Structures are given as structure tokens and as C-alpha cells.
Image (cartoon, rainbow, N blue to C red):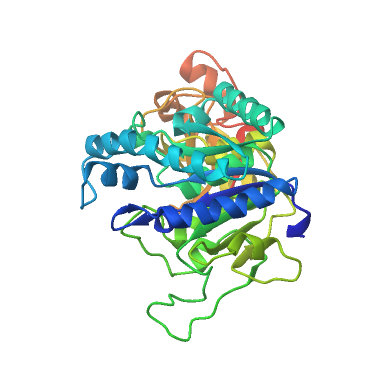
Amino acid sequence: MLKRTRRVVVKVGSQILSSSDGIEENRLRGLARELAALHTRNKEIVVVSSGAVAAGMSRLGRKHRPKSIPEKQALAAVGQIKLMALYERAFAKFDKSVAQVLLTADDLASRQRYINAKHTFQMLLASSIIPIVNENDTVAVEEMKFGDNDHLSALVATLLEADLLVILSDVEGVYDRDPRLHRDAELIPLIAEARGIRQAIGAGSMSPAGTGGIVTKLGAAAEAAAAGIPTVIASGLKSGVLEKIFAAGEQIGSLILAEQDRLPSRKHWIAYNLKPNGELIVDQGAHDAVVQKGKSLLPSGLREVRGAFGVGECVRCLDPAGKEFARGLVNYSAQELNRIRGLHTSRIEKVLGYKAYEEIIHRDDLVIL
């Protein structure tokens, strides 16, 4: 299956590229060699790379990772130049051209910019250029950051309708328990059901060099799976890892299969690209109508409104126990919803003086998680 894939997004984690002295240049060159070989075999390659802050620390002689946002952003600005120069030199040895693409969460939350980004990527790939993607840390504000490049890699894979997402880190794959605490932990070679895998696997950790542990990687795999894209999580510390992933009959890392019932592009965008600005707590009847019958969310089932949001913004939908079960775009503001919650739709106009919609969230704008 993997051998037949054509468009591949490869995420290279900071754990792979970072060293005590900054960037592990030999490892970067080795990965570039493998990626170039795949590209020569007519695969379209997109690289999502961490490492800008680490490169900036090396360039300025810093030994300790900064804690403040402005300092991180400044180091990223310095380091991104060095990181791209390393990639450009590494790929040039194999006569491959690269392009720098810097994104923020705000870019992909805007539907118009989302589509513009897609067109740019398509033109680069059609021109046989390898895009090197990173978060634009210099301008990204904390509340609109991707949080980690695992999430970014899943969004890019979805944007491009990739055939495969590969996440390279310092872990061999997904284990049934934390291998650092349990010597008998076993690698899970195949995960057929992506939903709930973050909750099922309790081996999450934070890496000192980056911001992503195995839980975020599983989250990225679940996002990709919802878009119909399989994911391989494997160790990028091993030489030849990419060659082995695409070799017929070779088993390496963990393969998370795509969901058969993939989300439409727009619904995936709502679920994973937009930042929720509020929460709606509904009763059990409303929950069941939405989840089991595919109905729209009506004001009669609304019990509580949390947050301040306007019309058309994204919100979380919570069941009576407080568990999120859906996300969607609201037809009324938080202030309006507080006035009509629990009411039958026939009373909306009497209370508000108008009735823009029958539904709080129409089912076309509602995504079951």
C-alpha cells in the first residue's frame, strides 16, 4: 500500500534535528538524501520541519531554550534562515530545488487563505519543487499557534489531499505502554481505528527539545485519518528509515490506517483548522439527535452557553457530562443564544424580534468528533 503512494508529507521533529550544539547537520543531510531518492522515484514530497529555534540558539550561542514568547520568536527568526540554508545545500547535492513556506494557524483558519495556500503548494509540486514548511513563529500569537508541528503536518497533509503522512521522531512508533517505564512494552505495528487512540494510549510525554509527545502525534494521525490519509509514526534517528517505510514487505514503526468514512474537506476544516471560541452544553436529547440521527442543533436542547462569540464562529458542543462530541459554526451570537436557550424554534422571533435561522447550528456546519 505505502509503495504505491505518490504525494507524501514528512514531518521531521525537533528531536531529530536538534543537538546540544544546535542542528544535527549530518542527520539533516541523511534525511535529505532519502527524501531526494523518493522524489526521484516520482513521489511528490512536502517536508514539515521543526528546528528553527534550535538553529537560532546555535547561531547566537545560546545553551538554554528560552521561556518567553518574544525570545522564542526572535530565535526562530534567526534560526529559520540557517535551517533553510542547510536544507537548500543538502538537497542541491541531489539537484533538487526547495521552497520555504511559513504558515500560521490564522492562515489556515481563513477559508480564502486556506485555498490560496493549497494553490501555492500545488504549483510548487507541479514544478517539481520540494516545499519545506514550518510555523511562522515570528508573527504567530500564542492563542493562534498550531501548538506543535505534528498538528501542522496533519493540516498540510489534509490541505494537499496527501496519500500518506509520515511523522519522524525519536520514538520507534506507538507502544501499548510507555517503553521508558516498562521494559516489556510492545510496539503496535498497526492501528486500524484512529478515533480514541489518544485516550487509549497513555504513553504521552513532553520532549525537552520540542513541544510534541506521542499523544500529539496520535492526535495528528487521527486528524489525517479523518481526512482519509494513513499515517506512519517512526524513528527518524535510524538511518534509511524512509527507504524502509516504502520498501515492499518492510515493517517499521506504527501504521495508523485512514478512516473509511472520511470527512468532507469543509467539515475537516471546521473540526481541525478553526479555534473554538466558546462552548454549548446540550441535553441528552439534543446530543442523541445530533450524533445518532444526524440532526441540526436546535435551541430547545441548549442548556448553557460559555464564552463570548459572534455569528459564524466555531464552538465546541458538550454533552451533559461535559464531554465534547461535536464542533460547529453557530447561527447566533452567545448573547442571542443565552436569550433563546431551551426555547422552541417557534419562539425565537418573539424573543429576539427576528429569526435568522431555525437552527443554532445547521447539520452541514456541524462535525461529529
Residue 240 placed where, x, y %?
59, 64
User: Residue at left 58%, top 50%?
Assistant: 10
Most extreme residue toward the top is 353
User: Residue at left 63%, top 44%?
Assistant: 290
Q: Is residue 332 above or below residue 85?
A: above
User: Residue at left 56%, top 46%?
Assistant: 154
Is residue 307 toward the left or the right of residue 109 in the image? left
Most extreme residue toward the front is 93
Q: Is residue 23 above or below residue 333?
A: below
In this view of the protein, can residue 325 be seen by the observer? Answer: yes
Residue 57 placed where, x, y %?
26, 45
Q: How many numbered discs sit on the rendered protein?
A: 0
Is residue 345 toward the left or the right of residue 333 in the image? right
Quadrant holding the N terminus: bottom right
Residue 226 placed where, x, y %?
64, 49
User: Residue at left 36%, top 29%?
Assistant: 308
In the depicted view, which residue is nearer to us: 220 or 193? 220
In the depicted view, which residue is nearer to us: 354 or 96? 96
Res. 254 image quadrant? bottom right
Is residue 338 toward the left or the right of residue 129 in the image? left
